[in-house]
Amino acid sequence: MIIVGVDGSRAGLEAAGWAAAEATLRGSPLTVAHAVPKWVCEEDTVRYAEVARWMREGADTVLASARDRVLRESPQVPVEAVLLPGDPRTALIKASEEAELLVVGSSGIGGVRGLLVGSVAYGVAAHTRTNVVLVHERPSLTRGEIVAGTDGSPSAGRALEFAFTEAELRGARLRAVWAWAWPQAGGFPPADRGSEQDTLRRLKESLTEHRERHPGVEVVEEVVHGHPVEVLREAAAGADLLVVGSRGHGQLAGMLLGSISQALLHHTPCPVAVVRG
């Protein structure tokens, strides 16, 4: 089951459309979810009964619009609309515990102009233990390619498997990208910190098992001398999807979302999947 959180915003509807297409590819049912404060759903609400009724009607409209978007794009997908009580972040995280994938719009109603990722989207991406896709808008023209960022970490390995699966489902090419040197205050590290050829060898090795499981996927291997955020942002331009691990090398224990993943949420030109590991 795939669950998509909607809030009536354009980004939410784009997320619903993306989730519908994904559900079609996976042959999965889709749940469209919208959250409201708990008191809105309580039958014994008296003092604010009219306000609660008005908010429930608004929520029904949001869900109906998202459901219509899903059925317009993917009429064969089994879709259920549910109203979740509570804070949107907490409610969506709890609702997605048994889901294959959680999809949200990257910015919603009330978002600050200039910020690509709203508080709900960021909160979900940072704290859910379900793989999550953030959708700002779906590119009108794509090149039939999934881009996966990797650094050799266990989290990156799980992201690669997710990316191979997505490429296989879509009949798309997979571009595996490794930013092989990190810039420092004084410039890039010297060559003896790791050569491009050595990094390419490590990249090939990290892809071996995934290639065996997905032999039909065309793979492009790319190592780039540069900062991971800038490298992946450029690589993702025109891609169907960018896939990253939730944490890479050098991240603090206990952090669910690493600094590279955080930065990419704000600067990616296509939908981005954050894979848990």
Image (cartoon, rainbow, N blue to C red):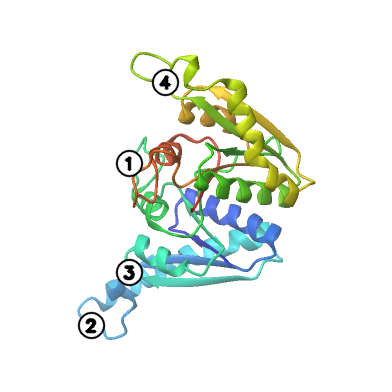
When the figure is inspected, residue 277 is found, relative to residue 230, above or below; the finding is below
Q: Secondary structure at mark 4?
A: loop
Disc 3 versus disc 4: nearer the observer: 4
Quickly name the residue at label 4.
183
Quickly name the residue at label 2.
46
Classify residue 45 as left or right of residue 179. Answer: left
Disc 4 versus disc 2: nearer the observer: 4
The residue at the point 66 percent across, 59 percent down is 72
When the figure is inspected, residue 33 is found, relative to residue 49, above or below; the finding is above
Label 3 sits on what residue type? Gly
Give residue 86's mark. 3
Quickly name the residue at label 1.
112
Residue 29, how many percent across, how many down?
Answer: 63, 69
Label 4 sits on what residue type? Pro
Mark pair 3, 4: CA separation: 43 Å
Badge 3: how crowded within 10 Å, few (<14), some, or many (20+)?
some
Classify residue 145 as left or right of residue 181. Answer: right
Q: Secondary structure at mark 2?
A: loop
Give residue 125's mark. none
Disc 1 versus disc 2: nearer the observer: 1
Total number of numbered labels?
A: 4
